Each structure stands twice: as structure tokens, then as C-alpha cells.
Image (cartoon, rainbow, N blue to C red):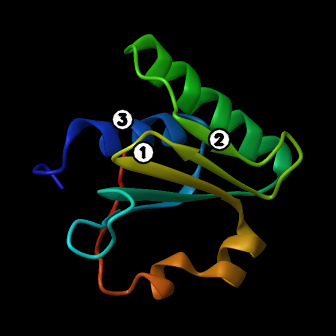
Amino acid sequence: MEHLEHLPRAVAAAASEKKARDITILDMKGVSLVTDYFVICSANSVIQAQAIIDNIEEKLDEQGIKSLHKEGSRDSRWVLLDYGNVVAHIFVEEDRVFYNLERLWGDAKAYKYEA
């Protein structure tokens, strides 16, 4: 994972600070034209998911990095934060299992983030 760019690691680290589970970075280069990386993580509840989202936004904002787009609201069970070459997906656990982005994008190289 050392060779991954700074931004996906920064997103994963910010999610980890709020106890996100099963943080996975998918290298989307060569697989998707939309972005270079997905960072996918799980939360136990909508409240925890919002804490994770807030922390990601705050930590990246401190580095002068603003999201280009956000999909989902404060009570959503899946929120997407688009930072251009990195797209973060924050799920409540059951919804992550249902949508299973790792399987959908199975051609992408996957890295488990460990704090």
C-alpha cells in the first residue's frame, strides 16, 4: 500500500479515526474512466457514518482539498464524496453488503487499509 498516492490514504486514515470498519482502497486506474481510486468503508449506524463523513471532509479541508461533489444526506445509508481522482463511499454495513462494490469492480486491485 506504500505506493498508493497520498489522497486515498488520507481519506482512509480520516475514516479510520472514526472507527470505520473494513476500509478498502480499490485502484480503479485502467478499470474505470471516472476516478483513479475508490475508498470504501463501513459504519455501524447512520450516526457513525455521518461522523466518518464529517471527519473525512474536515481532515481534507485542513489540507486545502475540497470535495467536488457529495451524494447523500445526513440520514443516508450510503454517502459518496467525490474528490476527483478519489471517490469515497461510506456505507452503513447492511447497504455495503447489498451493493457489494468490491464484487462489482472485481477487476480493480484491492488494498485493505490498516491504521
Q: Helix, strand or loop at disc 2? A: strand
Q: What residue is rendered at 73% in x and 46% in y?
A: 49
Q: What residue is rendered at 66% in x and 80% in y?
A: 99
Instruction: Return the residue at label 1.
Output: 12
Q: Which mark is residue 70?
A: 2
x and y percent of residue 55 in the render?
59, 28
**Quarter of the view holding residue 93:** bottom right
Amino acid identity at mark 3: Ala
Q: What residue is rendered at 56% in x and 20% in y?
A: 58
Q: Helix, strand or loop at disc 3? A: helix
46 relative to 21 in the view: left or right? right
Quick one: label 2 or label 1, which is nearer the N terminus?
Answer: 1
Quadrant placement of the N terminus: bottom left
Q: Which mark is residue 10?
A: 3
Q: Residue furthest left?
A: 3
Q: Residues within 10 Å of mark 3 (few under 14, many from 20)?
A: some
Quadrant placement of the C terminus: top left
